Image: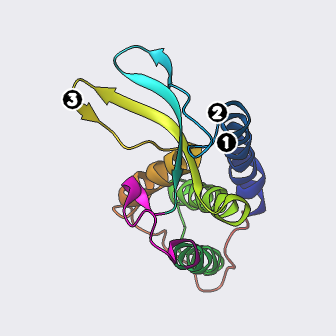
Amino acid sequence: MIRYLLTLTLPLYLLDQITKWMILANFPSPDEGYRPPISIIPGFFNIVRVHNTGMAFGRFNNFEYSNVIFGAIAAVALVAIITLWRKGAFFSKISKVAAALLMSGILGNVTDRVLHGYVVDFLDFYRGGYHFPSFNVADSCITVAAVFLFVSAFQKPPETNSESPPAPD
């Protein structure tokens, strides 16, 4: 577990926090004024500053207790991931990577909720009239982890020999 934490969870958590810090340092808060998006790929991709107190796609945004509720859900999820890991539920490499990505994403967004009272989103994709909700590095980690967990659900656990202990990570 430690290897995955050091090679995936920690670096991606730091990347998430550094990119969010850059957004906070270079874009005014929505209540301080407006800064137009920075167009990276015209007609497709911008960098923006969005405050999200809700969950994915801005659901329950500005709900009075959203930070407390989503913070508690995140804490339960982290405990569940660690418990499942220790019980050997993440037996394949892809499921271990998924768990490490999940922890990175959860920690990144919880850190925002604690420090700022909202999650900082800044990646803004759109095409014509379709506009995908803004997101961040932590959200990307969670999304990729979900795909990996789905794929790993179709893998069979290795045959275990009850006489030998599980291999360390």
Chosen colour scheme? rainbow
118 to the left or right of 130:
right
Is disc 2 in contact with disc 1, using a CB cutoff of under 8 Å?
Answer: no
Residue at 46 percent across and 48 percent down: it is: 144
Q: Amino acid at mark 1?
A: Lys
| Residue 98, percent from left and from top | 53, 56
What are the residue bounds of the magenta stretch? 54-68
139 to the left or right of 28:
left
Q: Give the Cα separation between the discs numbered 3 and 2.
A: 25 Å
Which type of secondary structure does the marked residue at label 1 adopt?
A: helix
Q: Residues within 10 Å of mark 1 (few under 14, many from 20)?
A: many
First in sequence, mark 3 or 1: give its number.
Answer: 1
Q: Residues within 10 Å of mark 3 (few under 14, many from 20)?
A: few
Residue at 39 percent across and 67 percent down: it is: 60
Q: Which mark is residue 20?
A: 1
Q: Give the Cα separation between the discs numbered 2 and 1.
A: 10 Å
Is disc 3 in contact with disc 1, using a CB cutoff of under 8 Å?
Answer: no
Q: Which mark is residue 129?
A: 3
Q: Which mark is residue 130?
A: none
First in sequence, mark 2 or 1: give its number.
Answer: 1
| Residue 30, percent from left and from top | 56, 43
Q: Main secondary structure of the magenta part?
A: loop
Which type of secondary structure does the marked residue at label 3 adopt?
A: loop
Location of mark 2 (residue): 27
Foreground pick, 143 / 166 = 143
Q: Residues within 10 Å of mark 2 (few under 14, many from 20)?
A: some
Residue at 52 percent across and 33 percent down: it is: 48
In this rendering, the answer to whether 6 lies above or below 114 is: above
